[in-house]
Image (cartoon, rainbow, N blue to C red):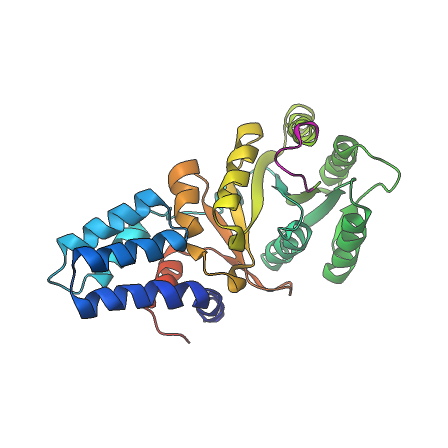
């Protein structure tokens, strides 16, 4: 299965430390010292303090058994089972993609378009990142490659105006999913966050026929900084899920857990490369097995 192979490989750096730490505990027997070492490793993988403490309890409770499978069961149980419920909506979808510059936002927009197009959905791209000319050009190139329509306006510096034009076009073209590339902004830029909030208002008030969903792109290698970014965005606009990018270059793959536990933001997609096909729907079982090394690489 391509997903398992790619995700297993993407989690290699995280798994090398996490799986080794569990193996050390099994070899040394469960002790105060071995549990402290395990705790340090899991926290360094950004699994979050609450999740780490719960895992240690599972290990202690099952110290006389092969506890790794109990840990696997626990970690699977704390992640959401159902994702990407937007596809069950009867209304057309507006998918707002938000995030900080450098997190792979525009590339993720293209990958998402490819994903939904492969599901035979009619997709329209809206290039509403008016602050970065290269983002519009980049998205136009992707749109040509994907053979999907794109709405942009080189002369406008108003993201909300571009969004309005895009949703008007989507309505007339009877589009299933509109994917909006918003301006990459630092979460500390209050004026840009206010502009983002305005875009949501435009979509909600002027286009009630659409269902609004949103994804935040987060660089997996940034660990706790990604958590801070997600929290700030969620304070301004709705964030329904995350695209975790650059997973293949980090040992901090545990960020999935605090994202959901602390912020109620599920990871819905994982990005592992630059190609259009390098985006996978998050699967909690395959993810946890790839993290712990309890599944064989295919």
Residue 35 shown left or right of residue 46 in the figure: left
User: In the figure, 210 relative to 222: above or below?
Assistant: above
> In the current view of this chain or complex, which residue is farthest to the bottom?
298
List the single residue furthest toward the top.
205
Query: Eyeballing the image, is 14 above or below 86?
Result: below
The x, y position of residue 80, in whole percent, is 38, 46
Residue occupying image coordinates x 69% and y 25%: 206
- Comparing 237 with 250, the one in front is 250
Quarter that holds the N terminus? bottom left
Left/right of residue 91 with respect to residue 158 in the rendered view: left
What residue sits 14% from the left and 59% below the top?
Answer: 63
* Residue at x 53%, y 63% (from the top left corner): 249
Nearer the observer, 297 or 262: 262
Counting from the top left corner in percent of width and height, residue 38 is at 28, 58
The answer to whether any part of residue 154 appears in the image is yes
- In the rendered structure, the answer to whether residue 111 lies left or right of residue 151 reads left
**Does residue 189 belong to the magenta stretch?**
yes
Taking the image as shown, residue 277 lies to the left or right of residue 125, namely left
Q: Which residue lies furthest to the front in this view?
A: 33
Q: Residue 113 in the image: x percent, y percent?
A: 65, 53
Magenta residues, start to end = 184-191
**Can you tell which quarter of the image residue 159 is in?**
top right
Total numbered labels: 0
Q: In which quarter of the image is the C terminus?
A: bottom left
Instruction: Check if residue 78 falls in the magenta segment.
Output: no
Q: In which quarter of the image is residue 238?
A: top right
Return the residue found at the far left: 64
Looking at the image, can residue 70 be seen?
no
Identify the main secondary structure in magenta.
loop
User: Residue 45: image x %, image y %?
Assistant: 40, 55
Return the residue nearer the eye: 287 or 119.
287
């Amino acid at each position: 299965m391509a997903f398992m192979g790619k995700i297993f490989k993407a989690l290699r750096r995280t798994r090398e430390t996490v799986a080794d730490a569990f193996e050390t505990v099994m070899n040394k027997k469960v002790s105060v010292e071995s549990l402290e070492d395990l705790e340090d490793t899991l926290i360094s993988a950004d699994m979050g303090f609450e999740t780490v403490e719960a895992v240690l309890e599972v290990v202690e409770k099952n110290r006389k058994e092969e506890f790794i499978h109990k840990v696997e069961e626990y970690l699977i149980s704390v992640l959401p089972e159902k994702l990407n419920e937007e596809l069950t909506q009867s209304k057309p979808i507006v998918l707002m993609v938000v995030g900080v510059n450098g997190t792979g936002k525009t590339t993720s927009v293209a990958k998402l378009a490819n994903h939904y197009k492969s599901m035979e959905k009619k997709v329209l791209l809206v290039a509403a990142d008016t602050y970065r000319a290269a983002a519009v050009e980049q998205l136009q190139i992707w749109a040509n490659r994907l053979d999907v329509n794109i709405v942009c306006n080189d002369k406008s510096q108003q993201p909300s105006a571009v969004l309005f034009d895009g949703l008007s076009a989507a309505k007339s073209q009877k589009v299933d999913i509109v994917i909006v590339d918003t301006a990459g902004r630092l979460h500390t830029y209050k004026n840009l966050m206010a502009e983002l909030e305005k875009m949501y208002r435009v979509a909600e008030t002027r286009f009630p026929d659409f269902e609004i969903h949103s994804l935040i792109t987060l660089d997996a290698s940034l660990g706790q900084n990604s958590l801070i970014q997600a929290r700030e965005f969620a304070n301004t606009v709705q964030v329904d899920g995350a695209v975790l990018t650059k997973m293949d270059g980090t040992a901090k793959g545990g960020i999935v857990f605090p994202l959901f536990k602390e912020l109620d933001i599920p990871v819905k997609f994982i990005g592992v490369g630059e190609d259009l096909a390098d985006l996978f729907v998050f699967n909690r079982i395959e993810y946890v097995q790839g993290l712990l090394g309890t599944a064989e690489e295919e």
